[in-house]
Image (cartoon, rainbow, N blue to C red):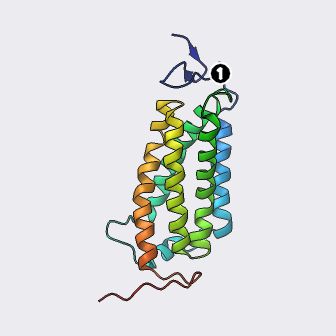
Amino acid sequence: MSVTIGFPVHDGGAVPRSRPRYRWWHAAAVGVAANLAGALPAGHNGDETFYAQLDTPPGSPPGWAFAPAWAVNNVLTLWSNLRVVNLPPETDGWRAALVFEAATWGLFASFSGLYFGLRSPVLGAVDTVAGLVTTTHGVVATARLGRLAAWALVPRLLWLTYASYVSTATALRSRDDLLGWKPRATG
């Protein structure tokens, strides 16, 4: 079995080019850009305080858990994206996988501005559920290209499934001054 630089010849999907066009630093640049884009509009002043003031459902994670969860998700996603982007562009399904991943990165980058910058739990929930939809399609499209690359996206899929429950329930239970949403009184 011959081995290409950094990639096995075959992992159940299409065979990558012999020399990857994109390297780890390209993936790192995408990750840094997405995180900067997410941080700039909202900053991160008071994010945990805002989150703590919301009426979150049972089983919600503490505010500090989001940063490490997304760090792991982003590293695995970048690794997967790098495997896919280095496949020949004529590979069937290559473009679809990259479009879904680009959409997911856009949603990731816009989340903080919507949720924390605008203080809108409803828009945060819409962004999170949209991220779950694009991730689901991205996993399916990526699985057609390589099993390892698809498996690397599964932690993000699981996190977004959980986060969709938390963000939707939080949006239904919490006030959203931007959109004028007031939860129904209970009791």
Q: Nearer the viewer, residue 90 or 15?
A: 90
Count of labels shown?
1
Specify few, some or many for label 1: CA neighbours under 10 Å numbering under 14, 14-19, or 20 or more: some
> Horizontal and vertical percent for residue 37?
67, 59
> Horizontal and vertical percent for residue 11?
48, 24
Q: Please name the residue shown 52% across and 81% down the image.
A: 176
Q: Amino acid at mark 1?
A: Arg
Name the outermost residue toward the top. 1
Q: Is 176 situated above or below 157?
A: below
State left or right for residue 165 relative to residue 145. Answer: left
Q: Which picture quadrant has residue 78? A: top right
Q: Is 25 situated above or below 20?
A: below
Q: Quadrant of the C terminus?
A: bottom left
Name the outermost residue toward the left. 187
Q: Is 89 situated above or below 124?
A: above
Q: Please name the residue shown 47% across and 59% down the image.
A: 66
Name the outermost residue toward the front. 92
Name the residue tied to disc 1: 17
Q: Is 71 situated above or below 97?
A: below
Where disc 1 sits, the SS reads loop
> Horizontal and vertical percent for residue 137?
52, 46
> Horizontal and vertical percent for residue 141?
54, 39
Name the outermost residue toward the right. 21
Q: Nearer the viewer, residue 168 or 23?
A: 168
